[in-house]
Amino acid sequence: METCEQMCEATNILTRAGMLACCVSAIVQILFTLFPLDFRILYLITHISLIASRSEICWDKFDMNYRNQCLNGNWQQRYYFDHASLTCRQFWYDGCRSDSRNMFEDHLTCQWLCESQPMYKSRACLQDFDNHYRDQCNGGRWRQQYYFDRNVKRCIPFWYDGCTGESENLFQDEMSCLITCENPTKKDRE
């Protein structure tokens, strides 16, 4: 039998949450053919409990202390589920600890777990790129990041040293930018 990674490899899934969803889907398809009626009932019960546990994480109150400087200014992009707008929002994180589980390493994981329709075209794609992100802010610890250029409708690489800003048009890797901005779902085109 193929592993989940092999079965889902063609789908270009980038996050642990996406890989989990793909694996669960593949396993469910196999089990539906083996145990049609009994398994469907069991699956529905399990699926309902999974949704409940997902929402618990999303509905944790976001701890504003996550935004404080707690380490040596090595700021990283993180996301949380905003209860007022019911969307995932970016913030800058420097290692502060909290009991709140409402913090995600990437935008897609936050969307998949918390938003009702996770693969929509993000507002980050529509925001102007903040050129301050190109400045030296973290002692020359340069790494490649990406932003979406609305004029050419492409993801553009640049060197990033950890500067913080208000624009969410900043992606840790090319694939995240491509999936979020260049390849929106059919719903976005309507």
Image (cartoon, grey):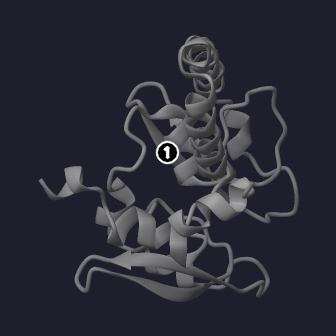
Asked whether 66 or 87 is in front, the reply is: 87
Q: Quadrant of residue 96?
A: top right
Q: Residue 164 placed where, x, y %?
A: 59, 65
Farthest residue, direction left: 190
103 displayed left or right of 169: right
Label 1 SS: strand
Compared with 103, 163 (above or below) is below
Residue plotted at (61% across, 70% down) = 172
Residue plotted at (51% across, 33% down) = 114
169 displayed left or right of 62: left
Q: Quadrant of residue 4?
A: bottom right
Farthest residue, direction front: 34
> What amino acid type is highlighted by mark number 1?
Arg
Using the rendered image of the protein, determine whether residue 14 is visible from the camera's viewpoint: no
**Within 10 Å of the Cα at label 1, are there few (<14), some (14-19), or many (20+) other Cα atoms?**
some
Pick the quarter of the image with the N terminus.
bottom right
Asked whether 63 or 37 is in front, the reply is: 37
Asked whether 135 or 77 is in front, the reply is: 77
Compared with 117, 189 (above or below) is below
Q: Residue 20 placed where, x, y %?
A: 66, 44
38 displayed left or right of 114: right
Residue plotted at (64% across, 52% down) = 19
Q: Residue 58 placed where, x, y %?
A: 59, 27
Q: Residue 121 placed where, x, y %?
A: 32, 56
Asked whether 112 or 127 is in front, the reply is: 112
Residue picked out by circle 1: 89
